[in-house]
Image (cartoon, rainbow, N blue to C red):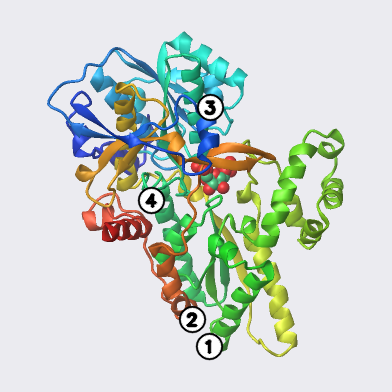
Amino acid sequence: MTNLSPLQIERLKYQPKLPASLANGISSLNLIEGSATEAVANKEDIKTLFKNTYGKPMVTFQTSTESVVCEQKNVGVILSGGQAPGGHNVIAGLYDALKQANPENKLYGFLGGPSGIIEGKYVEFNDKFINDYRNTGGFDIIGSGRTKLETEEQFQSSWEVCKKLGISAVVIIGGDDSNTNAALLAEWFVAHNAGIQVIGCPKTIDGDLKNEQIEISFGFDTATKTYAELIGNIERDANSAKKYWHFIKIMGRSASHVALEASLQTQPNITLISEEVEQKNMSLSSIIDYISDIVVRRSEIGKNFGIAVIPEGLIEFIPELKSMIANLNDIMSTLEKDSKYTSGSDSEKISIIENTLSSENASVFKSLPALIKSQLLMDRDPHGNVQVSKIETEKLLISMVEEKLAKLKKEGKYSGKFSTQSHFFGYEGRCAFPSNFDADYCYSLGFNAFALINFGLTGYLSSVRNLTETAKEWIAGGVPLTMMMNMERRHGEMKPVIKKALVELDGPVFKKLELNREDWAMNDRYLFPGAIQYFGPASVCDITTITLALENSTKLASV
Ligand code: FBP
């Protein structure tokens, strides 16, 4: 690689840390099995669908004095879904472990996400190739994609491609949907005696692929720190100019973990949490009342400025919109096959939809501005999800708050100024240089994925736990994918999927926001975290997220 920035040059030299059990070498491991596991919900359905891979035990690795021999193996790796900082290090860790186990082993990277394995598009890694990408952000090493692996033909062609390359294990690096693909593929390979193992790795900046066994997905740490830097900078600008209200939408497809963490790091005046909106059954107009009330009260003390943080997925959690979107998704899965609809103009599509939705949902849809209506009709992603990153919720809220304030002004209840700026922070954080935490965590996840392969496991998610301790004390192992699954409605049908972790309103992370909310609304307690630090004291460089620190300390306290 030529044309490197000074930071690129320095980061290429960084040596990621491994848990002590893995640092002793890939051949010196002992596999400790726990007891049989069960799916998180809909146990019987999941058991029926995953006859061969259901119920496996959780496993952990310990250092062994005996050496494990590694037969020659070829492994394939796929990056799946949205980018998350650290993906390159997962591949580097996997590559190092695989070569350490047997220098004859080969690692193939499938290009462009899951479609790479179906279409047989791949590269073979070597030292030089891998070395250029160590500790870098992005997924450009092999690219990513959102193709859903689910049909018989796709499985069959993946098998053909693996046979051609002599691949006996595939690692899928992805979020909840991609690891659902991993579980389906693992099951299919066992059912067909293909002799190909499948291991997943927990990726997503959204931080919603977590549970009792998975403390956090990789990328959350770096992405939230990046957004916190940006929000802190805007807070300082707002506090300097004192003339704008900034409405900042923060990425995170469904759960509000990213917005919550970024807010705890920066303490803005308003933070909406989708899960709270849903649980408290807050309508769109009550959200507008909540925001307007803070705008009015701040204006009364001479503050016509402020910062509001809005989670990307909010729109799907507002009860009346949630019901309308569910109805819309079902309708669209049918209309997608109807050429009268697909070839129609935006306004024709809107009119077809308005006439097909139930009357209650149609009136909610009709009440939205035209811009939001067309954004709601954009194509679903391959998993049937609304692409919330394309819906400008921040602008919707601004325009509705403006209307409300105009009304209050008329009634003599508001005399301030409401001048706004809208922002969306998402893509800015997904390919940042991984923080030291993500660089170490990802490298460990990749290294550990090969350890799981070496012990012949399939249908497992690579797991590294105890993450608030130093890397040496991290615990490496594996969690059966079926253990995290339940049934959910997708594209109008019930499907097995990995359960997303939403923000828990009785958990310590949300409680911290709740406790401080009123103080942060009126008094400007802005915090300025600044840019991620890669060199310097561990108290700054290796610091973890507030979410992980609070969740782990609560877990410890309850033991
Ligand atoms: P993954 O769950 O695949 O990691 O993707 C998460 C995400 O970054 C969301 O936060 C966001 O809504 C979405 O991807 C955006 O998708 P796209 O990259 O296709 O625009």
Secondary structure under the numbered disc 2 in the rendered image: helix
Residue at 43% x, 54% y is 224
- Give the spatial CA distance, label 4 vs label 2: 29 Å
- Give coordinates of residue 68: x percent, y percent: 20, 20
Identify residue type, mark 3.
Pro
Between label 1 and label 3, give the one nearer the viewer.
3
> First in sequence: mark 1 or mark 2?
1
| Residue highlighted by disc 4 | 221
> First in sequence: mark 4 or mark 2?
4
Ligand 1 quadrant in view = top right
| Residue highlighted by disc 3 | 114
- Give the spatial CA distance, label 1 vs label 2: 9 Å
Residue 54's quadrant in the figure?
Answer: top left
Mark sitting on residue 362: none
Secondary structure under the numbered disc 3 in the rendered image: loop
Disc 1 + disc 2, Cβ < 8 Å: yes
Mark sitting on residue 301: 1
Disc 4 + disc 2, Cβ < 8 Å: no
Residue 409's quadrant in the figure?
Answer: bottom right
- Give coordinates of residue 502: x percent, y percent: 49, 54
